[in-house]
Every structure is written in C-alpha cells, then in structure tokens.
Amino acid sequence: MDNKLAVCVGLWLAEGNNKCNNEITFTNNCFELIEYFHKVVSNLFAQYKPNIRVYIYDNAISKAEVPIANVIVKRYKDLRANRPYFIWRLASVNLMKEWRKIATEITANEENYTDILKGIFAGEGNIKFNNNHKSRIIRIAQKEEHALITKILRNQGITYSFKKRERAYSISGKWNWDKFAKQDIADLHPEKRKRFWEVYNAIKEEHYPALYLKKSIQNNLCTPQQTKDLAEILNRSPARISEEFAKLKKEGNVFSYKVGSQTYWTGDNNIIIISKIKDNYLEILKIKNLLTSEFAKEFNVCWKSANRRLMELEKLGLVDKYKNGRWYLKEGKKAVVL
C-alpha cells in the first residue's frame, strides 16, 4: 500500500490540484490511471465512506465509460478536448487535510522517490524521439523547475537539464534510460510504457574506446564461455560479441569448439573443449587401445557413430590410429569436458 500511495502522490503532484484545500482531485485522459488512483485513495479513506465523483469531458457526446462502482459520473462538453479526459474528485476539507499530511510524509522519505517519480512521469512525462538526428529524450513537463522533482532526479543519479523555454526537464543519455528501464519508471501509463520500450530497445549500444571490447572479451576467457554469456557480462548484443570473436579468431587469439549444438570459446590454445561423450572415448583409451568396432560394441552404437566420434577426436589432435587400426591416446593438449 505504501508503494501505491507514493505512486498516487506522484500522480497527484503531476495532475492534481494540490493548491486546493477543500478537495482531492486528479485529472488525466488515461482511464487506467484514474482507476489506479481511485482504488488506492478510496481504499485509504474507506472508513469515511467518501462521496467520489468522476467527470468526463469530451468535444462531442462522450461514449467513454467509467466502470467504477459507487461513484457519481457526470458528463460535460469541452470543444478543446482532442480526446476524452477525466477528473476524479473527492470533496472534503478534512480528508484533504489528511491527504496533504500523508503526501508530506511520503515526499519526505527518500525511499519513496522511485515510486513518486513513476507517478509524476505517468502524469507529466513523455518521450521525444527524432530518428533523423538520433535524438532520444525523456521529458517531464513543468512550467518552472520543481524542487521535489529536481531532488528526486539528483537522488536517483539521473542527469538532466531544465529548459524554461520548453517548459520541461530533459533527460538523455543511455545511462539515464537504463535507470528508467531498470526501475520500470515509465511503466504505469500504458501508452507511455509502449513508447518508452520501443525507443529504449532501439537505442544503439554505447561507443566504447578503441579495443575496449576486444580486451574485455579476452579478459573474460579465463574459462570457456558462450557468446550469450559474454554478451550478458559485457552488456552487449550477441551479434556484436560474435563480430569481435570472428576478428579475434582470425588473429589466432581465440579458439572455438562445438559441443552438441553449442559453441564455446577459449583464449587458451592448450585446452580443447569436448563433450562428455567424447571424454568417455578418451577414458577408455587411457586404459587400452581399441578398434572402431570395439568402441561401437563398448558404447552400444553402430560402427559409423563410433567412427564419427573418433574422427572428430582425431581432428582435434587428441587421438590417432596405428596401422593395425587400433586407436590410441595422444599426449599434449588438455581436454576440458563440458
């Protein structure tokens, strides 16, 4: 409840009449937000049996519905409205005093800042995207710089600029987008949530200094790794990691091995990555030298299957065959079983 209250305080600060002393109001054209605010605040004051009204404004005869029980619904015409908008209203001097006290306590606690920001962004936030200039900006509309919003952004480590001419906080830089994404700050409003994730997922990866990624890959190959694992470790896409692997392999700095359907990479040329099945063949050769047919019988497989495994081990330089057809274990490289 505390988290949801903090979100509602953010919504109210963004789209409520917080200067009024005799009623709690919240205005928005997104009914999901109206419904969210109603559930939390009406539950908070349920013991008082509050008289709640919801007003619908539209430029024509509105077809918008308010599927909320026990509220009075009023409809009005507003020729300026491009789409229907709603005003949630609870008229009570005493409850407004109580609400303001709660809001003051919540905004004074830094632990609530993320949830408050979620509400503020849902009410006043938007995404500005210019594909031609590759400009991606998170904006929070405000006529003047707001002390609490400024404090929250600084507390969250979010860098910003306030442009009075644009009447908004402007937030750019992938590190800031990452913080919004990690904390789901833009997820409360359904349309803004969709827009945020579309733009965020399209952001190109950060540019690192020359050779940074190559060195980072090599430093992380102390143990065999898959492309997807390194992509997660280095916060890059698998495709980008694959590009660097191709370059490093061409230079002879990394080596790849297929195990089942998976490819593993290593920077150590003294080890060879193999499957458990291949290792079983090597374990037998540590004891005795066998013909291909004897391997087939040992593992209860056909001759072709056993020969295929042995040929793969031969290609890796781990086994060889005498003139009499018997396979033997070669000394040298170390096999790593996965």
Image: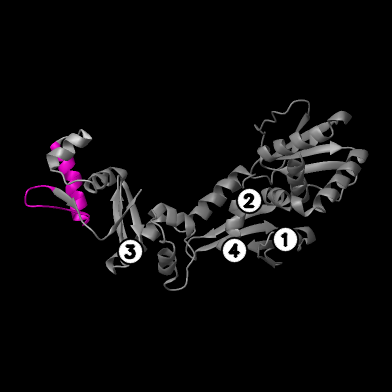
Query: Label 4, label 3: how many angstroms apart (C-alpha)?
Result: 37 Å
Q: CA distance from mark 4 to mark 2?
A: 16 Å
SS at mark 1? helix
The answer to whether 5 is drawn above or below residue 218 in the figure is: above
Q: CA distance from mark 2 to mark 1?
A: 14 Å
Residue occupied by mark 1: 155
Which residue is the site of mark 4?
172
Please state the extent of the stretch shown in magenta in the rendering.
303-326
Distance, label 1 to label 4, CA atoms, is 17 Å
> Which numbered mark, 3 or 2, is in the foreground of this view?
3
Instruction: Please state the horizontal and vertical placement of residue 152, each as a whole percent of the image.
Output: 73, 58
Sooner in the amino-acid sequence: mark 4 or mark 2: 4
Q: Amino acid at mark 2?
A: Gln
Q: Residue at x 69, y 59 (%)?
A: 156
The kind of residue tagged 3 is: Val
Give the x, y percent position of residue 91.
87, 37
Q: Which residue is mark 3?
A: 254
**In this rendering, position of residue 112 left or right of residue 200:** right
